[in-house]
Image (tube, rainbow, N blue to C red):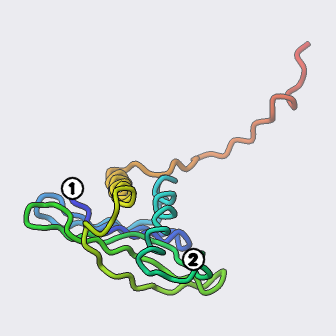
């Protein structure tokens, strides 16, 4: 499986993953939440977005990385990566932020490790490994609320 693009909008709770399986292009679009690890990786990638854009420190908290697009060379290795992002205008309003496409060698080892983790999380999602949502909410009393045994 070759991941071509992953985008997760945490606010709209929508995920979109484009990938190749063999020579067939496939896509998963869903509202089922991914594992928390995916959101954590995207949050950590925000530092990479700041480095790429070189925005002033005051704008640092407004960039939200939502995913990435990947380009591959003729040997199947990653050649270019483009982070996908939004710019937070206020609490409830965001706009698409255009990030530049960068060569794979532009990224340092720690950043590439995060990108590898993002791809692994996308593969997990496609393979059905997603956040566990309880089917039934149980209202169990706390241990100290249980009646005393006679």
Residue at horizontal 45%, vertical 71%? 66
Residue at horizontal 48%, vertical 75%? 50
- Percent of width and height locating residue 52: 41, 76
Residue at horizontal 69%, vertical 41%? 138
- Percent of width and height locating residue 94: 55, 84
Image-based side of 139 in relation to 61, left or right = right
Residue that sits furthest to the left in the current view = 74
Which of the image's four quarters has the N terminus? bottom left
Residue at the disc numbered 2? 60
Image-based side of 93 in relation to 39, left or right = right
For marks 2 and 1, the one nearer the N-term is 1
Marks 2 and 1: which is nearer the front?
A: 2
- Percent of width and height locating residue 23: 10, 63
At label 2, counting other C-alpha atoms closer than 10 Å, the crowd grade (few under 14, some 14-19, many 20 or more) is: some
Residue that sits furthest to the top in the current view = 150
Q: Is residue 66 above or below residue 41?
A: below
Q: Nearer the viewer, residue 89 or 80?
A: 80
The Cα–Cα distance between marks 2 and 1, rounded to whole angstroms, is 34 Å
Which of the image's four quarters has the C terminus? top right
Q: Is residue 129 above or below residue 38?
A: above
Q: Nearer the viewer, residue 92 or 41?
A: 41
Residue at the disc numbered 1? 1
Q: Secondary structure at mark 2?
A: helix
């Amino acid at each position: 499986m070759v991941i071509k693009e992953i985008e997760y909008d945490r606010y709209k709770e929508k995920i979109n993953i484009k990938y190749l399986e063999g020579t067939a292009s496939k896509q998963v679009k869903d509202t089922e939440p991914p594992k928390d690890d995916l959101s954590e990786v995207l949050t950590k990638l925000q530092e990479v977005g700041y480095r790429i854009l070189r925005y002033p420190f005051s704008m640092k908290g407004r960039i939200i990385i939502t995913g990435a697009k990947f380009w591959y060379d003729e040997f199947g290795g990653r050649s270019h990566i483009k982070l996908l992002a939004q710019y937070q205008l206020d609490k409830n309003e965001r706009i698409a932020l255009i990030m530049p496409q960068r060569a794979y060698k532009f990224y340092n080892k720690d950043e590439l490790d995060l990108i590898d983790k993002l791809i692994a999380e996308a593969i997990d999602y496609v393979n059905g490994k997603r956040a566990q949502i309880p089917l039934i909410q149980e209202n169990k009393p706390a241990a100290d609320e249980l009646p005393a045994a006679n």
